Amino acid sequence: MKKNIITLIILLITIPKITAQTYKVENKHLARILQVTEGRLSTLSIINKQAKTVLRPTSCDEFSLRFSIPAQMNNTDHILSAKDFTVISASPYVNPQRPESKGYLFRLQGKENDLSLTVCYELAEDESYCRKHLELTSCRDICLKRIDVEAIAFEDAYQNYTLKKITARGNAQWKPGLGQPLYTTQTGTFWGIEFPAATNEVNNHQINCGYLWGQTLSQGTPYISYNSIIGVSADPQFIDDAFYNYINKIRKRPLRLQIQYNSWFDYSRNVSKEKFIHAVEKINNELVTQRGCQPLNAYIIDDGWQDTSKETDWSDKVWTINSKFQPDFADCFRSVQNVHSQLGLWLSPGCLFGGQPMVSKMREYGFEALSSACL
């Protein structure tokens, strides 16, 4: 009995649980109120100061992790949320990459698992959107399959697209996440992940913003998730405008009109160096020389330039060029330079149209790859 009491005291000293505290990440546009109750982290409310509305969760998992343990014979999936962790510390946070973005950092320890987790919330003074990310470390090797950075329910949560409407053609038949945001229709907020292949969904009013990862997380090696985003609008009817304003602010360069020629519509995959150069000269002569139009921004060689044969040399390249073009596209480069434009190449994001054999090679090089087997 005495030994058990001593063990319990040691555990309490090692993992000091924060029992009841409220934390506020706030600026003039919005506020996210966080609470720790009996060691559990959750969102108490989100205040949209622009629209003067308050979001109060009907339920809050806060986040969700789906993983399996390779060493287990049945390879069962485990799904954990905030209820499976205990908050052991909370502290102010300043993003080292964006010093103007500040918030709180919570360190969590798994109750009945070998995982430690850091949850970070941040908000810059003049931005109408806040970010959140997770950092996960495991004491054993696990296969981390999906990460939902946000898992929270609101009465007015709305998904303005359905996965059934996202179709795929070709051999792969894959249905990737396309990163579309989620909305709250009455309180004027948008939700998403800063990752183009995110899958954001609403089921029974619950918002899940996350993505498939499907990689092994080695023992003791931290994994940092992509950021989630919560943005606000002054009017719920114009939430689309608020979302696109956010997109414009985070663009690497401003939105611009891009006028270009694409070889697919003339030659499909039968394009060659000679055909492409003929098209460049013809278009420039008709539009620029004879009619005084501005030079095109780019001329694109579409599908038909890649070497997808089984004999392709992959020793030092990811994509190889077939015999219809020079190894460096020298003549094609010269032709577009002569008409004051730029050369572009099309790549299939799904390695379709004959590029499927490249997937396994790119996976060997360390690239992430989706296939019908893991969807």
Image: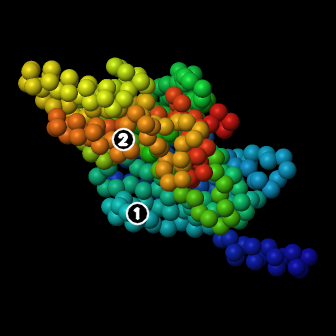
Q: Quadrant of residue 340?
A: top left
User: Looking at the picture, how far across and down is residue 131, in whole percent?
Assistant: 43, 51
* Residue indicated by mark 1: 95
Question: The C terminus is located in which quarter?
Answer: top right
> Of marks 1 and 2, which one's residue comes earlier in the chain?
1
- Looking at the image, which is closer to me, 106 or 363? 363
- Looking at the image, which is closer to me, 176 or 208? 176
User: Looking at the picture, how far across and down is residue 92, in whole percent?
Assistant: 45, 66
Q: Which-is-in-front pick, marks 1 and 2?
A: 2
Q: Is residue 182 above or below residue 80?
A: above
- Mark 1: secondary structure: loop
Q: Which amino acid type corresponds to the residue marked 1 in the rendered image?
A: Asn
At x 9%, y 20%, the residue is: 291
At x 40%, y 63%, the residue is: 95
At x 76%, y 59%, the residue is: 112
Q: Which amino acid type corresponds to the residue marked 2 in the rendered image?
A: Gln
Tell me the CA gap for discs 1 and 2. 47 Å
Which mark is on residue 326? 2
